[in-house]
Amino acid sequence: MEFLRNAAQSVIDNKTQWGNFILIFPNNRSITYFRKYYKDIIGHSVWAPQSASISRFLHDFVDGEKASQIQLSFYLYEAFKKVLGTDSDFADYTLEDFYPYAQIILNDFNEIDNYLIDADKIFVNLAQLEEFNLDSDFLSEEQIETIKRFWKNYNPHFKQKFLIKLWNNLSKIYDEFTGILENKGLTYGGLQRRRLVEKIKAGEIEFDRYDKYVFIGFNALSRSELEIMKAIKKQGKALFYWDYDIHYLNDKKQEAGIFLRKNISELGDDLKYGHDNNRK
């Protein structure tokens, strides 16, 4: 947690220059530790700066309430039945039968939204998937990983009867599912981020509530997070305190540094010290 102590010290040193600002963290746990270090450095009880997890922060920019896992499972089953309910292989599937598959599909839908992947392109017909080798340029790295994860997570016993038809119809199920959620005013994490990126690109979002948005403790980013942060940086309002060890960043052989080097190249690095002791 030495990184968060260094981040707290930097916030204390620079806060008077930032005007009205907010600190944004990957999760609530990071906020808790940051506030502890902030108080320790100040030396007495004090109100910590305005802070939010990335999920809480982004939620304020999009319409719709975040659905519970049970709600998502139920509406996914509803979409599944609308698309495949008349198929003889699926007509007898109850919500209880479908539930284990629903959890994997929901995770995949969340991932493709987080990485801004087109559902129509990733859930291609299996005949096309065989035609386009997984190592070809037809698919991005995110698409390849999603495809591999889908097939890995299921019992091979179901592939012939269930999974092939399910896979070939997932794009339709995705469209039906997200349509149901939109009609009911509901959403989920990945879909919120996709919608926000769409609004940013359409010029419908201005990050004008704060003078500075300070992102603290991030490492690898999803594509949607990267696009959102780039938009705030473009307005000259974003600062980035990345959580990394300088050893992994500088060693080109370390895979852990690949994403960080890309993030720093595109977004900058505003915490200039303290990255050499994160392994302690």
Image: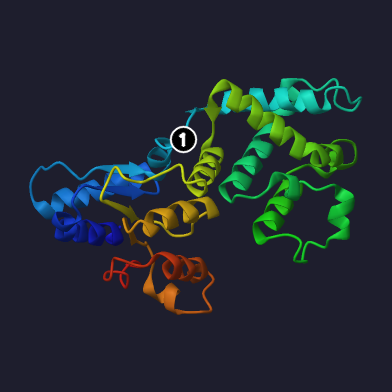
Q: Is residue 226 above or below residue 110?
A: below
Residue 72: percent from left, percent from top: 60, 27
Q: Quadrant of residue 267?
A: bottom left
| 16 horizontally vs 110: left or right | left
Q: Quadrant of residue 83?
A: top right
Badge 1 marks a residue whose secondary structure is loop
> Residue drawn 76% across and 38% down?
170
| 17 horizontally vs 62: left or right | left
> Residue drawn 28% across and 61% down?
2
Asked if one can make out residue 101 in the rendered structure from this viewpoint, the answer is no
Q: Is residue 82 above or below residue 256?
A: above
Q: Which of these two is toward me, 222 or 212?
A: 212
Please count the marks in the image: 1
Q: Which of these two is toward me, 193 or 74?
A: 193
Residue 195: percent from left, percent from top: 54, 40
Residue 62: percent from left, percent from top: 46, 35
| 132 horizontally vs 177: left or right | right
Q: Residues within 10 Å of mark 1 (few under 14, many from 20)?
A: some
Quadrant location, the N terminus: bottom left
